Amino acid sequence: MENVDLRKANTMSLAAAANFYIQNCVSIVPLNAMDKSTYVNGWTKPEFHGDLSYWLNNPDRNIGIALGKNRLLSLDIDNAENFVDCMDAVMPAVLKATDVSTPFYELPTAEIVSGRGGSGKKLFRMPPVYAKVLTPYKLSWRKEGCVFELRCAGQQDVVAPSVHPDTGNPYQWKAGGETFEFLEAPKDLLYLWTHWSELMDCMLQEDPDYIPEKPKRVRKPYKHTEGLRSAVEIMDAWSCTQNLESWLEMYGYSFVRGNRMVYDYSKTGKPGCKIVRGVPDKFFTSHASDMEFFAWEGNRRKPRPHTAFDIMCVHECGGDLAKAIKRAKEELGYD
């Protein structure tokens, strides 16, 4: 984007302004008429260029400026009064950390105004080193909504002479000082941006309706006392002492080949049971007729692994897990 006074677009028609931006190498985005949103997919891609045809076909379309492609950062203030309160809370620490005397929001950089009181945008040039580092942020208060945003690559800002959807007034470029220019993003703005997670809560606490988040409960890890074994350990240990094929044959399965077995009541006769060797051995069954294990959890209707312990629990303990674990402990000789 060239160093040009974009205030010239303030008095142009939308189509003429679009042509003005394009001629001055400003990457723009066609927006919906009297709206802030775009109807174009893929406008963030490097190969996309908002050519004049979009406005020649529909001269009422608003215009957006692509922040990333124009190497710009945007400070979008929605509530100036609340913004000042937020800055009062964090800027003393930010200015001290960056050794800056004048805060970024007081610098004479280019601005966009829409005629809506208490709002406006300041735009800065983005240092190349931050091109792929910064992400957009938005600070909102509970009842009053958005306070301000930090906007960057992947976003677009509505520019002159687009029409604001709420006020019906045209957006206007404004010089922050004696001349119209985009200043390089200062250190304190970049510090706020890169330390957002640390500073955000301080700004939220300025909200009169602020409700602090309840601290998340941290569960203490369960510690096994000496000699005490978990239920899963007992199940697996017992299954390792058993012959899985024998248990399957005992309760309706027949060996076919390799690690495949078939359920005796299968309508297809296909070997839908697969044994997987491990510690302990496990089996998967896709036989819908074996409802005990094909639908082990509710009605999932999806094969899942089972062990010899599962067969013992279902068929010999009536599905009573406590009874099955007690039996396994006794047979293993556990106290």
Image (cartoon, rainbow, N blue to C red):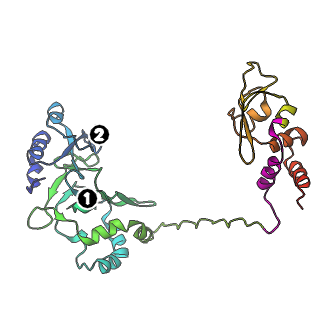
Measured as percent of width and height from the top left, residue 124 is found at 21, 62
Does 23 sit left or right of 213 as displayed? left
Q: Residue furthest front?
A: 258
Is 88 drawn above or below residue 254 in the view shown? below
Q: Residue at x 19, y 40 (%)?
A: 49
Q: Quadrant of residue 221?
A: bottom right
| The disc label shown at residue 283, or none | none
Determine which residue is flagged by label 1.
74
Determine which residue is flagged by label 2.
42
Measured as percent of width and height from the top left, residue 104 is found at 24, 70
Viewport quadrant of the C terminus: bottom right
Crowd band around label 1 with a 10 angstrom C-alpha radius: few (<14), some (14–19), many (20+): many
| Dot 2 or dot 1, earlier in sequence | 2
Measured as percent of width and height from the top left, residue 270 is found at 72, 22
Q: Quadrant of residue 107?
A: bottom left
Say whether residue 239 is magenta: yes
SS for dot 2 = loop
Front in this rendered view, residue 94 or 334: 334
> Is residue 16 visible in the rendered structure shown here?
yes
Three-letter code, disc 2:
Gly
Q: Residue at x 67, y 34 (%)?
A: 302
